[in-house]
Structures are given as C-alpha cells and as structure tokens.
Amino acid sequence: MSIELNKNTIEFIRLRCRSLVDDKSWPYFTLLGQAIGSILLILEAMYRCNGSAVFIEWQIRWDTRSLIQYTDMVSRVEHRYENVTNSQAIASSKLLSRGKLFYYKALIRAYTSCLKVCDVNMANSSWTANHLRKLIKRDVKIVYPPCDTVALREFPLGGRQKTILCVAQFRPEKAHATQIEALKELQESNSVHKNAKLILLGSARNQDDLKRVETLKALAKSLGVESNVQFIVNASFDDLLYNLSTASIGINTMIDEHFGINVVEYMASGLIPLAHASAGPLLDIIVDYNGERTGYHGRDVKDFAQRIDEIFSLDSNKDLEMRQRARNSVVERLSDKKFNEDFLQVLP
C-alpha cells in the first residue's frame, strides 16, 4: 500500500503453463498432478527470465499448501473424516482410504527429500514450522511474512459501526457459512444485536467462487438474516480501506490458516480480531501483548456468536484499550522492517 515502484524496472510475464497448477486440471491425483505441473511451470519461468542472475519462486509449490498439513490430512483419512481435502466417497470407503494413505505417504517422501537439500528451511508461522520439523527432523526458522501496516494504523480506533467484517477470497476453506450461521445464533441469543451487520468482502477467482457466493446468499436468506449480510465481491482497494476503517470486528473462521495476513490487517486497522482457534491466528497473531489479550478465538458457530456478543458488550474504555493493544502488537512484531531483519538474520 505504501510501496513506490518504478514501472521501468518491472516486467510482468504471463506463463502459458499456469493452468498446470490449477486443481481444475487435475480432478484426480491432484497433488501429484500439481507437483508435475509446478516443475514445468518453474522451468518455463526460468527459461523466460532471459538469463536473470537471481530467480525467486514465491509460489508455494510441490503443493506445499497441502503437504505442509500432511499430518492433519493423514489423520482425517485414517479416521475417515469427510473434509475439503477428503471427499465423502473416499471417507466412506475403507479400501479407497487405504489407497489415499499410500498415495499421500509416497508424495510426502518426495517432498521431504526436496526440503532436506535446502541450506535453510524457513516457515511463515509456528504451526507451519512445527509440521515441517516433524517431516524433515531438523530445525526450521520462523520468519513472519512482511505486513505493510503504514496506512492502516492511521485509522481511528473509536466511532466504529456495529459491523463484523470478513476479508477473504470466496474459497470453500474460508468457511463463510460459519460466519452467517454465527450471526443468526447471535441474534437469537441476544436481541440487542438484531441490527448487527456482517460484511463479506473478497475476490472471486472463477465461476465456482461466484456460485459459492450465490449459495451463501441463499443461506443468509434461509436463516432470515439476508438484510444483515452484505456481499462485496471483487471489491476495490478503496472499498477495502473504507470497511477496515469503520468495522468493529474482523473475523476469520478458516481452520488451520497457516498465518493469516487478513487478521494482521484487522488488528492494524483498529478492529478487534476474532479467528478460529488454530494455526497462525492462535499461535502467532492474536496473542497477549504486555500480558493482556488482543482479540478472541472460537471453534464453532456457538463459540463465534458468544465471542461477538462479548466484543460488542465491552465497556467503551476496555474496547479502545484492546484495539490499541492489537494494533501495537502487530505493528511492532509483523512489520516490513521486522521481516527484512529476520530474513537476513537466518540466511547462512
């Protein structure tokens, strides 16, 4: 947001092999297909860099987004739990579950071998680092990603609307339905919050995401809260800044979010954060500051509704104090400057 760039020193190149890392290209054996596709994609990128001295690959490939969660994914398959990464057809079949376990373990051996040849292994959160340590049996350095909060920390802390804001792409793992159901639970448990509003702001990558938005709208209507839920799809940057400057609560209901940049943005902007009690938001972001809390965590619909009620019911002084602590916490620990320092420190 506060980065100045010289357009003469930047060139964008559209890679023709991009579709090979799209899960739509691999309806079956997705991880293996994306792994092969990522190799071809990176080879194309290196070829088209025209002999550049430095090549930085900033996508998480060999599908590490999924493989880093290997231990959790294996547990779901072993116990035959249905999940985003484990379909009902596989979860209901003992034979298919065994086959999938074999497939996962073969992939993870190849992935682990790749990690072990690195001079330095870094992770962007404690949760991710812990998973990697289990895989490679060696030290993994934690370097939090750069978070540009310069503009956000100028927003006023007071005068906030009775609004819950979610900033996230309309992907299935973001669990937007949980937020809509929590709003309904909140209104049923305490009528004083009948005017509370939920804003779902984010981008839709494709037709599947747009269909997901329509499904969420139908859910809000069926629960009788459609007038309290606003969808802002493919919002402009100005829309994002406006809502970050006026909303009261920033919510993230995704389970096992590796880090959670949106939660950092909530806190820097002066919102009180409410996130799922797992992974990055639990271990690294919404943590105590000077011995006092900076936000809240929840695990299910009822939990989230109760936490929202607590936040809206805070005494005005305690409300402002928590917002200030949340802002101070992320500005001090998760800035661009801190990233640069930590990144250079762990290099060999």
Image: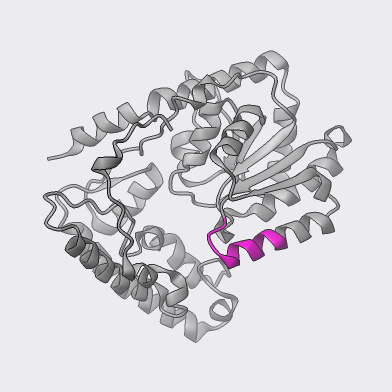
Residue at 81 percent across and 50 percent down: it is: 226
300 horizontally vs 121: left or right? right
The residue furthest bottom is: 95
- Residue 314 locus on image (x, y percent): 72, 22
Region rendered in magenta: 204-215
- Seen from the viewer's position, the closer of residues 26 and 119 is 26
- Seen from the viewer's position, the closer of residues 228 and 79 is 228
Picture quarter containing residue 92?
bottom right
Figure quadrant of the C terminus: top left
Residue at 24 percent across and 57 percent down: it is: 136
The residue furthest top is: 317
Q: Is residue 128 magenta?
A: no
- Residue 252 locus on image (x, y percent): 58, 44
Residue at 43 percent across and 33 percent down: it is: 1
Q: Is residue 212 magenta?
A: yes
- Residue 158 locus on image (x, y percent): 66, 18
- Residue 201 locus on image (x, y percent): 62, 45
- Seen from the viewer's position, the closer of residues 197 and 278 is 197
What number of labels is visible? 0
Picture quarter containing residue 244?
top right
